[in-house]
Structure formats: C-alpha cells, structure tokens
Image: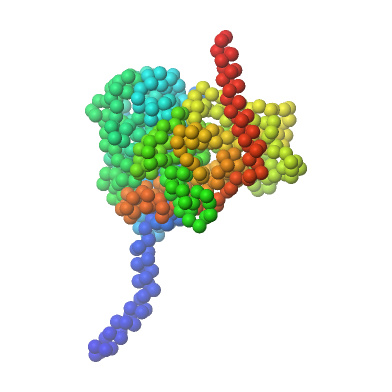
Amino acid sequence: MDIGDFFTFIMVQRTLNFPFEMQKEKAEATSYYIGVDVGTASVRAALVDQSGTVIDQAEEALTIWEPQPDHYEQSSDNIWRACCVVTKKVARSAGSGRIRGLGFDATCSLVVLDKQFQPLAVNAEGNHQRNVIMWMDHRAGSQVERINRTKHGVLRYVGGVMSVEMQPPKLLWLKENLAKDCWEKAGHFFDLPDFLSWKATGSLTRSLCTLVCKWTYSSDKGWDDSFWQEIGLEDIREDNYSKIGNRVVSPGVSVGNGLTSQAASDLGLPEGIAVAASLIDAHAGGLGVIGADLTGRHLPCEDQPITSRLALICGTSSCHMAISEEPIFVPGVWGPYYSAMVPGFWLNEGGQSATGKLIDHVVQGHDGFAELQKKAKSRGQHLYAYLNDHLDQIRAARPRDFLTGDLHVWPDFHGNRSPLADLTLKGMVVGLSLSRGPDDLALLYLATVQSIALGTRHILEAMKSSGHSIGSLFLCGGLRKNPLFVQMHADITGLPVVLSKEVESVLVGAAILGACASGDFTSIMEAMQKMSKVGKIVLPNPEHKRFYEKKYQVFLKLYEHQREYQAIMDQC
C-alpha cells in the first residue's frame, strides 16, 4: 500500500466511525446534577441537566410521629434511607453521562445525635428512632416567649420576634425537659440540611443559610456569646460552638472532599463527586425560580432588577422571599440575612405556617368531603381539580356574584408567622350556614384559598412599607399546580405571577447547588440564570380589583376582632 492509499484508508475509517465518535463525545460531554429535596412528608430527587431541565425524578414517603399536640417528630435514619432510594433511581437515568455534583435542601428541622453520631431521642419515651424535632413542632412555646422577652439585639434580624419554629427555643426545651436523657448526652445538633451534607461527606461544615436563618449566626460577626448566656444556653458555647457548628460556608460551596465511599455506595453515585453546602427547602425554591430571564415577555417587571421579584414557595406551608442590595428591617418578617439565598444580597423571609395543610384540613373536615371524594374518583379527577370545576359551575349559575362576599376566613389555624409573628393566633371562619352540601364545601374551599392569598398581600404590604419594591411574584412549590391558588394570588395582590417552566423549582434549586459545587459554573448567579426558565405567566383580572380591595379590608378587621375577643376573655 503506497502513501496515497494509506491516507485514503484512514479517511474512510474516520468517515465510517464519525457518527459513533460524535455520539461518544456527546455522551461524555453531557453533565448532570442531582438535587435532593427533603420536604415535610417525602423526599424527592431529580436528575437535572445544565440547562435546568429535569430529566428524571423520584419520590419516597417519610414517617411522621405526632405523640401529642404540637409535637412532630421524624427519624434521621428514615430520612437518609429515603434519600438513598430516590437518588439511586434517578442516577440510573444519567446513562453514559456524567453526574458532576450533588445538592441537598431540606426543611429546617432539628436533628440530634449523641457523641458517637448516633440518633438521640427527642421525646420522653426515649425512642431514639425519633431524633428529629420537625420545623412545624410548636412544643417550645413558653421557651420562645422567654427568649423574646430578653429583647436581645440578635432578635432584630428575625423581625424583632423569634419564631417557635427556629432552633434556639427547641434547644432550650430539650435542656429543660430532657436534661439527662438528651441534653447531656448530645454531641451534635444539626439543621436537617446540614445533617445531609455531613452524612454525604463526613464534614461538619455548616451552611451559612441554615445558621443565619434559624440559629442567630451573623455572617460577619459569627455567634453572639451574650445571647446564648442570656437565654440559659451558655453551655452551647463549649469548644467553640462545636455542637452547633463553627465551620461555615456559603450555599453552593463544595463541602469536604466530596462524596465519601460509604455515602457513594448508599446513594449509587461515584465516590468523590462534589457535594454542595445545602439550603433550607424554601430557599432552594427561591434559587430555582427567582433568577429566570424575562426578556421578551412584555411584562412591566421585565426591565426591573431581581430585587423587584418576590419568590413565593407554596407547599405544606408558604415562604415569601424578597432580596435587597442593602439590609431592610421588616417588623414581623425574618431577616435581613446576608447571602442566605442569593450570594451578595440580603434576604427577608415572610411566611405562613399552614397553607397546603390548611386547605386539606378545611376540605377534609367538611361533612361533604366523602361525597366529594366519590364524585372526583368517578370522574377520574384529582380532588382539587374537581372542586375547581365545581366552582366554575357555580359561577356560571351566578355570573354577577363573587361567591364569597359573605364568607370570610382568617387563615392562622397554626399561628401567624408573618407579619404579626404571633404564635397564639387562631383560625376564624365568618359566614357559616347550616348547609352541608357540595356547594357549601366548594365555597368554603374558595374562601380558604382567598384567605391565604390575602395573607400573602398582608406580608407584601409590610415589606413594601419597610422599603421593598415588589413588582412580580415568582411562584413555585406544590400549590403552583392549582390554577385557582395561582389566580387568587394574582388577583388579590394585583401583581403578575410568574411560574417556572419546571414545576419542581425546589429540585432545580438543589441541583443548582450541585452544579455550582462542581465548578461547572463560576457562581450561583450564573447557574441561576442558565438553569432557571420561565413557563406560564398569570395576570391579575382588573375586573376583580374592587372586590378584593374590600375583601382585604374585611380580612384586616378579622384580626382586630380576634384581638378584641381575647382581651375580653383575658379579664376573666
């Protein structure tokens, strides 16, 4: 074979192999990230590509114990097993692609381990399986009242009043109620997101998000010794706060040396891949939606800065996340927290302790619920899809009627988180009749959804009066799947509601953390802009504005009346 024939042979071989080689290079170039979200009742994982598209996802239920009213407990072992199940499932879908990073988010529940890193009971029964005090646990009511009476300076950064859902009151409850069986044996107290990153890497590094938002840590000053001394938890300061964390990094920073061999085996992932410093679940939702590009959407907010957007994460509860370039102090609203969600920005976090849970409670507690279930099942519809259709039928029969002019709900069945910051508040329903039929249930459901949206407006008004300028709502979470819930928020706030392209923005937010930790993006901001995508946009109906203005006035009166009733009864 002469030299000419040789080169001809080589070119033919390259031509024949070209499609295979291109496929191989493409597979090798495909990078994926896994986001794991530990919610209240389940763990979910998603495989996400560099554009923010969810390739696959899986879900596993969690066990919740409620041994007595206001006590909610979980198991860290149960949570980790569920994380392993869902991660293994979605990892298989990567095929020959590369999984480059792993990010966790979770509820801000308190995990307690002993000095040997074993689960330690947070209950009088001594059941070590139940070693997690859930975020929605309100057992520490008296403890948080005493903490708030100190009026310590750190409280300025939680809206002036600490919530029972934060960690210091829960720690104080453990010390006062389980001193020998828990407090003295405890070696480590984790926020659940930090427990997950420790479990994956073996590193005790904590996320700035969790410590700043739930533990009173300051991003520039660290821990305040005088606060822990004044509330009776001076022993938490031992060994430079080793029990609650003394190594702190920003969300998205790679933790430790990546995934340990044991965790890699548990999760079905390659050893050593990057694991990001975690986020609280609501903050992951904000990260997954707030940075989306609105170019060409023809909205008034299109040319406004990211600080004009409020991320609303709606599930069992709701969180309202507003960011600013300078610190803004909003009475009754948590924060300002520096770099707790978006690096370089201050965060204010409003919230409602029961939203999805409230809707379920009201609907399932109605006499017509059993009949509703049967009808929805017979039509092959989801319960709330059927209820929404039924409301449409009622509207068609009463076209000039807004339906809830004489039916009003105050939604604080589990206390008020924001902007009143009052654990003692209770729910109210005004305008009930003797009717128990499907129409009555549908209208009560509508009034409840409206009350949640009115509560969002209440929080927005507090933020605006303190200096925030909010021009749009970026909504994600389970309730964004309910069109009635979305439309009511647009109508009642008077703002456009932007829905993410990916329904599971919280999972995308967790994956963004993993992407940033992998080094594939230079910053969280870059990852947000490239992985967050806009889907549907819902505009307020201008014809409904006057009605909801009046409805909001009634909403505020309900609070005044409840306070009057309490004042009268306090005289007994």
Query: Residue furthest toward the right?
Result: 397
Q: Quadrant of the C terminus?
A: top right
Which residue ends up furthest to the bottom in the rendered image?
A: 2
Residue 274 on image: x %, y % = 31, 49
- Residue 488 is situated, as x and y percent measured from the top left of the image, at 60, 41
Q: Is residue 263 left or right of residue 530?
A: left
Give above or below for 92 relative to 430: below
> As displayed, is residue 285 above or below residue 370?
below
Q: Residue at x 72, y 39 (%)?
A: 401
Does residue 306 show up? yes
> What residue is drawn where x is 39% and y is 73%?
19
Q: Is residue 18 left or right of residue 322?
A: left
Image coordinates for residue 265, horizontal then vertical, percent: 33, 48
Coloured how?
A: rainbow
Relative placement, left or right, of 410 versus 28 is right
In front of the other: 472 or 284: 472
Tag count in the figure? 0
* Quadrant of residue 555 within the rendered picture: top right
Q: Residue at x 45, y 29 (%)?
A: 331
Quadrant of the frame with the N terminus: bottom left
**Is 365 situated left or right of 535 in this image?**
right
Quarter-of-image position of residue 14: bottom left
Above or below residue 549? Residue 139 is above
Of 221 and 362, which appears nearest the observer? 221
Q: Position of residue 47 (x, y in %)?
A: 42, 53
Q: Looking at the image, can residue 371 be seen?
A: no
Q: Residue at x 55, y 50 (%)?
A: 537
